Image (cartoon, rainbow, N blue to C red):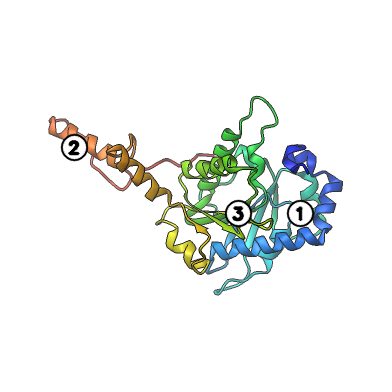
Amino acid sequence: MSRPEDVLPPDLFYNDNESRKYTTSSRIRNIQADMTYRALELLDLKSPSLILDVGCGSGLSGEILSQEAPENGGPHTWVGMDISPSMLDVALQRDVEGDLFLADIGQGIPFRPGSFDAAISISAIQWLCNAETSDVSPEGRLKRFFEGLYASLRRGGRAVCQFYPKNDTQRSMISGAAIKAGFGAGMLEDDPGTKNSKLYLVLTVGGGGLQGDITGVVNGMDDVNVLDARRKAMEVNSARGGPRKGDKAWIIKKKEQQEKKGKVVKHNSKYTGRKRRVAF
């Protein structure tokens, strides 16, 4: 059976008929609900938050976000974005509580930097691995998406993206694009090796690594495969014999060399070597 993303682009595949079928299927609703609850568990939000729902469709995940109340306070507030007008039309007919935005996530996330406390995405980002025209590449679409997502989240914010990669190449392409955008990244797989396997990409903006956070959330499950981007970068740099060009350590080392030569260099600060966020 063909995967939907191999048949048509998402805005064409999810026409009026497919959008209604998707939303009214009890099987799909149950699966979507389970994955949304899992994503919320991994987000581990302690207070009501403003959440971006990437690929929100007809608002099935949004309904749960509107109902779930963290330990301190009321339910979350959410904004959903999707490329399918038909899906968003169904969401409007269902009178969901979130705000809805028609947009192609492969063109970026068109919100002000630091707008959201967290983000979720259920069964959507694998579509970015397909390019419908010869002048659009999956790498470019993934780059714009993750850079935009990184910018839209506040420092310390977290995103959880559940997705269905076609193969290991897509899995690596997606996680690699997230790390290049600046995220700390962890990969978690529920029920590995079964037809019910579900893959989650857990991302953080700033702060420390993810290993302790993820294992705490999932109660130390053995099937947690964590990828701490910062730790891995340090290991790669060590293997190469030093920091990579452009990194903070590389810049400081170069400044020290210039000072020894008697040249005037700028004072080091917390901004030295910091990557600039994407400007919208």
Q: Looking at the rendering, which quadrant does residue 271 occupy?
A: top left
Q: Is residue 97 visible?
A: no
Q: Amino acid at mark 1?
A: Ser
Neighbour tally class for label 1: few under 14, some 14-19, many 20 plus, Cα within 10 Å: many
Mark 1 and mark 2 in contact (Cβ < 8 Å)? no
Please identify the quadrant where the C terminus is shown.
Answer: top right
Give residue 109's position: percent from left, percent from top: 59, 44
- At 58% from the left and 73% from the top, the residue drawn is 73
Residue nearer the viewer, 180 or 101: 180
Q: CA distance from mark 3 to mark 2?
A: 45 Å
Q: Amino acid at mark 3?
A: Leu
Q: Is residue 247 visible?
A: yes
Residue holding disc 1: 58
* Label number found at residue 199: 3
Q: Looking at the rendering, which quadrant does residue 254 occupy?
A: top left
Residue holding disc 2: 256
